Structures are given as C-alpha cells and as structure tokens.
Image (cartoon, helix red, strand yellow):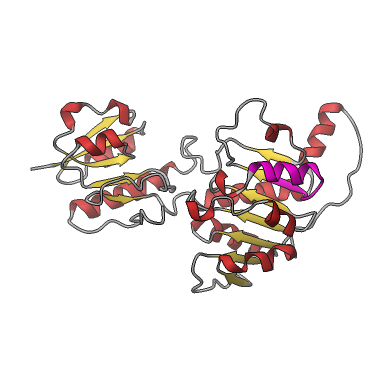
Amino acid sequence: MRTKIIVTGKHTEENIQRFKELPGAQIVFVPTLDDVSPADWADTQILVGGVNKTLAENMPNLRFVQLFSAGANGFSWLPERIVLANAYGAYGDSIAEHLLTTTLMAMKRMPEYFEMQQEQGWRLLDDLVRFEGSRILSVGMGAIGSSYLRKSHALGAICYGVRRTVHDCPDFVEELVDPSGIDRLLPEMDVVALSLPGTDEVNGMFDERRLRLMKKDAIILNVGRGNSIVTQDLIRVMNEGHLRAACLDVMNPEPLPKDHPLWTTPRVYLTPHISGGFRAGINYPRVIDTAIRNLTLVLNGEPPIHIVDRTLGY
C-alpha cells in the first residue's frame, strides 16, 4: 500500500516530477492547506509545507509533517505522535547575504545618499564606517548567524557569537558566549545581528536597557522574529539619536500597520520579511532538496533530519 503524501504550494514541473518519483508514495498536490479535501483526511500520512489544527485533528494517520520554513515556534500544539521537521539550513546563506547588504548599507549611509538623489541635492556625509576591523556580534548561531559571521570574518570583521549553549567555537569567531554574556559584549560591538526564533525565551530580549548598552553609533539588525526587540523602546532610543541604524526584516507587529510610528522613525530601515525569499524563488531549490531528502528517509523507515524540538520551537 502506498503512502499518501499531500504537498502544498506551487512547484516547478521538475520538482513535481521529483515528488512523483518517490518510491511507494501517492502524491496529492494542493495550492494551500485550505484546499486539502476532506476525502483525503483519513488516509493521509504525510503533509509537506505545513499543518493546521483542523488537519491535525482530522487526520488520524498523519505521522510526519515537513515544513518549508525554518521557523517552527508556532507548532507546540501539534500532537506528539506527529513528527515535525523544518527546513533548517536552507535559508542560511541567503539571509546572511541580506544581513551583509544591510550592514554595509548602514555603514556607508547609503539611504541618506538615495534621499539626496530624490531631492537632487549634493552633500558629502562624514562619519562613514569601515567594515574591515569592525566588531560584529551575532545573537543566534544557527545556520543564519553562522553564515553571516563566516562571511563577515572573510571581509575582515572581528566576530563574536551568542549561542544557547556554548560548544565548538568556530575558527571564524573570536569569542562564543551563552546569553548571560550578552551585556558584557554589547558596549564593544559595532554591529549586533539577531537571528532568533520567536520563542518566549527571547521575547523582549532587546529592550531599552540593552539597546542603550550598545554604542551610540552601533547598528542593530533583525532577521529572526520581531518579538526579540521591544518596538516602542527601539522607537524611543532612535528618536533620541541613539544607534546609527536599525535594519529590520522582521518587526512587532507584523505586518506593520499603516501609520505605525516605526515607518517614519529616523534611521530605521524596513523590509517586509523577505530576506529568506522562498516565495521569490531564491531558496526554493534548497528547500525542496531538504523535503525530498526527508521524505526519502521517512519512506524508508528512517528518521528525518532537522526534527523540531517543540519545547524549544526549533
């Protein structure tokens, strides 16, 4: 008897064929989870792309869910009988490139030059910063944070990392600490990059106290989840001239409502949660490779890689 697998999303013909060629599998493609037919509830064993409570409650034979995302903190409710895996690692290099882009943009004050162009003005800005020799702290040392520091080190930065538990310090990292060491490092850092999951543990980690521990001309970046920075505290310190720039690909709330003060806060640069870029196709091949690999393992009776610990959210 073949294993019924429902795959959500829009896919290339090449990858549709890859799914169809999985041995012993019956593949059903649907655009979204809402399009899953009740006729498929009883005998579906695997969902690819995500899951919601309605499906989990009505699919008695569901045993494995493969996410297309790396973030998995919203699935603590999922029954323990269902194994959950994410796409850890598929997004790391792409998001690290986004971090590098925004770091250099802020160091070289490029947004202000763009504004001059719109005004057809000509003024030379001082107070530019060299990337080489700068001190960069990555709070979060998963695939994203590690890739960002590796690339930054190659460009001459001095790199520091924060990891939940300290082990195996990479050779491109000057010092690796657990969260208790953040306050000691912050006053010396030129750039602080956050790539944290949206768990309760990191909720509000960067409040006004921590933001003011940073150097006045430091840069803060966030590509993890918006709840790790207290939005009103960030607005307050930026309005007072503290911090060179805040480059946010995630924010709280998200999506940011029209007329929210964060839109117009000075030196805050926003992008709409696009650094991963799955829907734009940037990381699509890597995500599908991870899904195919895990489906192959599960169909062969082996455990998948990147199983999510639902108590941690990743």
- Of all residues, the one furthest to the right in this rendering is 123
Q: How many tags in the picture? A: 0
- Could you say where residue 206 lies in the image, as x and y percent from the top left? 63, 53
- Can you say which quadrant of the picture contains the C terminus? bottom left
- Of all residues, the one furthest to the left in this rendering is 1
- Could you say where residue 263 lies in the image, as x and y percent from the top left? 69, 32
- Could you say where residue 3 lies in the image, as x and y percent from the top left? 15, 43
Identify whether 30 is placed above or below 250.
Answer: above
Asked if residue 240 lies in the magenta stretch, the reply is yes
Residue at 76% over, 41% down: 267
Q: Please indicate whether residue 120 sits to the left or right of residue 91 in the image.
A: right
Identify whether 30 is placed above or below 194.
Answer: above
Asked if residue 256 lies in the magenta stretch, the reply is no
Q: Nearer the viewer, residue 261 or 43?
A: 261
Residue at 49% over, 69% down: 165
Identify whether 140 is placed above or below 239.
Answer: below
Q: Please indicate whether residue 131 sits to the left or right of residue 73 in the image.
A: right
User: In this orientation, does residue 148 appear?
Assistant: yes
User: In this orientation, does residue 314 appear?
Assistant: no
- Could you say where residue 253 lies in the image, as x and y percent from the top left? 57, 36
- Can you say which quadrant of the picture contains the N terminus? top left
Determine the image quadrant of residue 19.
top left
Determine the image quadrant of residue 301.
bottom left
Q: Nearer the viewer, residue 6 or 265?
A: 265
Q: Nearer the viewer, residue 102 or 292?
A: 102
Q: Which residues are magenta?
A: 231-246
Residue at 62% over, 72% down: 175
Residue at 42% over, 44% down: 69
Identify whether 264 is placed above or below 143.
Answer: above
